[in-house]
Structure formats: C-alpha cells, structure tokens
Image (cartoon, grey):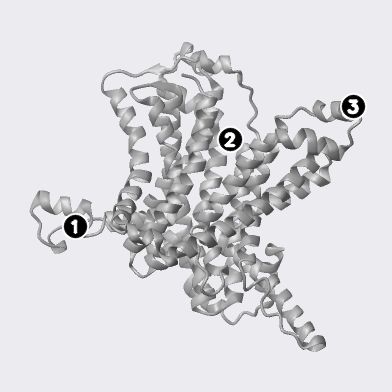
Amino acid sequence: MPVIAILVIAATGGTDSWPHLLQNVIPRATMRTLLLLAGVGAVTAAVGVGTAWLVASCDFPLRRSLSALLVLPLAIPSYLGAYAFAEFFSFTGPVQSAYRGLFGFQSSRDYWFPEVRTTGGAVLVLASVLYPYIYLATRSMFLMQGRAAADVARTLGAGPFRVFTRVQIPMARPAIMVGLTLVGMETLNDIGAVEYLGVQTLTFSIFDTWLNRGSLAGAAQIACIMLLFVAALLFIERAARRSQRFTSQKTTAAVQNSVRLKLSGWKKWAAALACLLPPIIGFVVPVYVLGGYALHRLEQFSSTRLLSALWNSVFVSASTAIIAVGVAFVLAYAARITRSQTTAVASRLASFGYGVPGTVLAIGVLFPLASFDNALDAFLRANFGVSTGLLLSGTGFAIVYACTVRFLTMAEGTIDAGFHKLSPHLDMASRTLGRTSTQTLRSVLLPMMRPATLTAALLVFIETMKELSATILLRPFNFNTLATLVYEDASRAKVEDASVPAIIIVVAGLIPVFLVSRSLDGGRED
C-alpha cells in the first residue's frame, strides 16, 4: 500500500514543481547519491572483506578479541556517527587542537585541515558504521570455505595473495553482494547524517521538498526515483549471485580442523592494527565524544523532556516489535505448513519494506492514513455531528505502521530461520498422537520457537528505537522519541545536549551486537 500510494501521489499530484526539480534538484541530488553509494560501497567492501579474511584465515595477536570488536560499530546509528565526527574533527576538537599544539599554529588560517562536512566526510562516517554488514556476511562465508580450496590452490603454485583474489573472493561473492546491498539500502535510508554534513542526496531532497517547499507531489516524484535505486540494488545483488553455485564443508569439525596462515614479524602486528582501526573509528570515537559530553550532563538523565522521549521510544518500539513479530510468525508458519508458491510470493512481497527508505515510506504511509482520517471525519460530521480528528495519521500509529513495514523483513527472517531448525517430523509426530494443528502449534512449536521469537522482537525493538528518517516525518506535534530528540538538539548545534539520549540509544544498540557476538562465538573455532 505505501508503494502504491507513492505512485498515485506522483502521478496525480501535478507537474508544477517538476521543472524546478528537474533543473535544480534532481541532477545534483542524483549525482551526490551515486557518489555516496559508490564511495561507501568501495570503503565498506575493502574494510569488511579485508578484516573478515584476516580473522578467518590468518593467525595473529588478539585475533579472537578483535573479531568481536569489529562488530561494535553496528551499535552506532549513522546520524550519531555524523554528530560525533563533526565534533571530533572540528576546530575546537581534540584532533585539530593536538595538531595546532604540535606545530605551533595559532588559528585556522595558518594551516589546512580536511573538512568533514563534505561528500568525502559522509563516506567516512557511513562507511565506519556500516562495514560490519559486509564483515559479518563475508566472515561466515570464509569460515564455511575452510582451508580445503585454499590448500589445493597452494599445491598448484598459487601464493597467499593469489589464493585470496582468485579463489576465496569469488567463492565469497554471494555474501559480499548481500552485504553491499544492505549497505546501499542503509545509505539510501540515511537522513540525519547527510543533512548534518550538508550533503544533498535524494533522501534529503525528499525531506526538503516536502517540509521546506511544501510540495508533497514533488517529494513523491523524487521518491519514485529512489525506488528505482532500490530496485537496481536488488537486481544487481540477484544478478551477481545468479550463477554462483558451490558446495562447502559445513560441519563443525571441518571448521575446527582448519589451519590458518600464521603471520610473523611486522605482518602480524600490521594485521592486528588493520583489525583494530575500524572499531576505533566506528565505535570508540563516537562513544568518546558523546560519552564525554554526557558525563558533564548527568542531571539530564532525569529531565522530564528526556523521560517523555524515552517513554515514547519504548512505547513505539514495543508496539512495533509485537505487531511485526505477530505478522512475521503468521507468514513463517504459513510457509511451513502450506509450502505453496502463492504463500512464498506473498511473504516476499510483505518483507519488501526493508528496501524502501524511511523518507519514502513516510510519504506512502501518511497519504492513505490521512485519507482514511479525513473520510471518516467527514462521514461522522455529516451524519452524527461528531468530529474524530486525525485518529491514525495524527498519532504514533503512523510511526508504528511505517516501522512495522520497514522491519518486518528482520522479524520474518529470524522467525523463519527458527522454524527451519525444527524438523517437520515434529508436526507429523504430534498429529499422529491426536493433536490438532492448533494444539501442535500451541503446545509443541511455540515453546521451541520462544528463543527465535524473543530475538526477533528484540531486534525490531532496537532498530525502531534508532529509526529517524520515517519518525521525523510522521511524528505528531510535541511528540519526540530519543532519535528525534537527538536530531532536534543537533540541528540547533547543541550536540552536547543531544549526547544524553544518544548514549541511551548506543547502549540499547549494544544488545543485538552482543547477541551477534555470542552467536559468532558459539559457531566458530578456537
């Protein structure tokens, strides 16, 4: 429905603003978006694949600890990274202050320093917090490969670098493309970082055209262009994996018996440093900046403004988690018991929302909800003399609806993976013992699915708490979540005040990171 609503608005909203958009907005925004996608994709691929190969295939000091630390930037939303980096590299920040002290400079006119508020700065910020998507997917693929294929290539005379580029990278290409697609979608979805850093992407253009220029039709028309970007990302990912077919040893013994390339001398310390720098840049720097500000504002943790935003975040996130998990459970269970093509297609369509950027989704959600509210209000006024106002579009329901659409994929994937771990023979055995399908679901499957269900709910809860792009456009008046509270303070150049809710978001984001680290520890070798 949101996608259909966007197409309808774009087609029926008129073309008055189209000449201005086509001449002044779309070409520049499209070019910036392409540059940002290319830059972030290249950096995250280099960092994610390189570090994944090092921790999976090589032996060097602190390898196990570093393999867990490399996941930490997932806890940092991109907009928090942008606020922290801008402060860290500002004129009064620690980097430039140390630089001036080292060389004796007195003012900014005495030296040149790269500016963070550029497209290059946005690439640095987004890549530093998004590379774990590629790292996690590629690392798992490298571990599944073991050393068998690499050892065969070595016996044929290939050196370590050629084995990496000619054997291991091609075998890991499906995982790399999945990670790159996720990175691309998160880059398209970002609004807080690009706005703060002054990079006019298509996402920012939608926001600016809708709110600042008052043109919903123009925003919808730009949104259609972004949908083309999403479709292109999905097509490229599918095409890159289409002909990739190979088998690998997946047993625990195969992984445990794999022998890594033992590094020595300066190479082992270079590998350790290469794996240490990404979490320092993507996690330690934001936590250092925001945590330092928050420690000087401890009284704000009990402020009414913060507690109200925290309650709103918890309420919206919990509601989204409950609804998304409920819908995801129905989809996954229907696919389990029917195994029909229609059910599979319906499930795939329902989980398409993750690929739609939040700003685009906000337009598609607001239009049908507002139309329903207005129609209901007009009907009740005409027949009963009662005004209902904005029941759906003027409340937190719109945010819950948009976040449910966006994060349903995450819940459905987690629950479906849990169902795949349960043998279908469990259902058959229960039915032969006289239980109905409903009784089997309630007494057999639900208890065994509790870990997957709770994990899915937790992931959706945390992601909703961090969501900014849809929330900032759909929230009612005087309704703040932690994310919008951070956005408001940072947009008024009060990053120090934004640090307290930002730290709460980071701490909440560490929970799924901890779960991911535990799953990696449980399934990997020593």
Residue at the image point whose x is 66% and y is 52% from the top: 322
Sequence-earlier tag: 1 or 2: 1
- Depth order, front residue of 390/433: 433
Q: Label 2, secondary structure: give it.
A: helix
Query: Could you give the CA–CA distance between mark 2 and mark 3, rounded to whole angstroms?
Result: 43 Å
The quadrant holding residue 197 is: bottom left
- Depth order, front residue of 479/289: 479
Q: How many marks?
A: 3
User: Residue 433's mark?
Assistant: 3
Report the side of 92 relative to 165 (left or right).
left
Q: Position of residue 358 (x, y in %)?
A: 57, 60
Query: Could you give the CA–CA distance between mark 1 and mark 3, rounded to whole angstroms?
Result: 78 Å
Crowd band around label 3 with a 10 angstrom C-alpha radius: few (<14), some (14–19), many (20+): few
Q: Position of residue 473 (x, y in %)?
A: 55, 69
User: Residue 248's mark?
Assistant: none
Q: Label 1, secondary structure: give it.
A: loop
- In the rendered image, the quadrant that contains the N terminus is bottom right
Residue type of the residue flagged with mark 2: Pro
Report the side of 320 relative to 187 (left or right).
right
Query: Could you give the CA–CA distance between mark 1 and mark 2, rounded to whole angstroms?
Result: 42 Å
Task: Give the labeled residue for mark 2.
Answer: 174
User: Residue 112's mark?
Assistant: 1
Residue type of the residue flagged with mark 3: Leu
Q: Position of residue 59 (x, y in %)?
A: 38, 20
